[in-house]
Amino acid sequence: MTQDRITQADLGWWLSRAAELEWTFAKTYAATAPHHYVVENRTPGVTHEDMVRAARVIHTFGQPGKYYSLTKIYLVSPDGQHRWWTEDRHFTDTTLVNRATTELSYGIQNAQATFSGVDTPFDGIATWWDAAHPISDGEPDRVKRLVAEVRGTYPPHVLDVGCGTGRVLDLGLVAPERYAGVDSSQAMLNLLLRKHRRRRPYTP
């Protein structure tokens, strides 16, 4: 992994690494959602840096899937047998990666699409984007006041072209049911869905 960028080399690293690891069966979920996991400092040879890097790879190259009402980002193995995902709010907090077989699904699989088939310069930096561009104190209120001066208080319908990770939603400028986001970067849309799981992004 180069500093602040995930590339195809990182994807190759994870596919190789995942095949070498000793995966532990999650006994607690044996009857409800059988899966395996690896965890830093307990799975032999797995470090915190490995888990953070894996989480960034999964969210850069994965696609949305449903776990009942929740939308998660899953990376599917090239042979289609397994999918990997993480649960932590911040990538730097990731300590564990889950793995399940793709033959099992939970709930209606109607997750939003993020796949565009386009490689963009933003793909590799998507998992750092929000941390590098934080919302400043008071920014949402200031922007809302500026927008209200132009359009009044009636909530607009918004087609957010080049939506990235969803700044318009982050600032609360639009009601979720009135929002559609478009971006050619699959990874940026994955990050939007990671934060705003009930929103509807679109790709070209």
Image (cartoon, grey):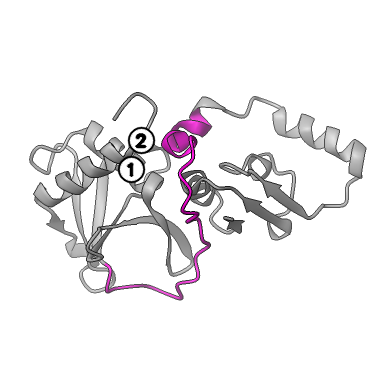
- Tell me where residue 161 appears, x and y as whole percent: 68, 47
* Residue 62 shown left or right of residue 101 in the figure: right
Badge 2 local density, few (<14 within 10 Å), some, or many (20+)?
many
Q: Report helix, strand or loop for mark 1.
A: helix
Q: Which mark is residue 57?
A: 1
Quadrant of the image occupied by residue 203: bottom right
Which residue is drawn at the image coordinates 47% and 60% (left, top)? 71
Residue 148 seen in this snapshot:
yes
Q: Report helix, strand or loop for mark 2.
A: loop
Q: Is residue 184 above or below residue 47?
A: below
Which residue is drawn at the image coordinates 62% and 51% (left, top)? 182
CA distance for labels 1 and 2: 7 Å
- Tell me where residue 176 appears, x and y as whole percent: 68, 56
Quadrant of the image occupied by residue 41: top left
Q: Is residue 12 above or below residue 108?
A: above
* Residue 114 shown left or right of residue 38 in the figure: right
Cβ atoms under marks 1 and 2 closer than 8 Å: yes
Which residue is drawn at the image coordinates 19% and 39% (left, top)? 40
Query: Does the magenta segment cover residue 103?
Result: yes
Q: Amino acid at mark 2?
A: Ile
* Residue 159 shown left or right of residue 42 in the figure: right
Which residue is drawn at the image coordinates 25% and 58% (left, top)? 77
Q: Which residues are magenta?
A: 102-131
Q: Earlier in the sequence, mark 1 or mark 2?
A: 2
Q: Amino acid at mark 1?
A: Val
* Quadrant of the image containing the N terminus: top left
Q: Which residue is mark 2?
A: 6
Task: Please give the count of numbered marks on the rendered protein.
Answer: 2
Is most of the magenta stretch helix, strand or loop?
loop
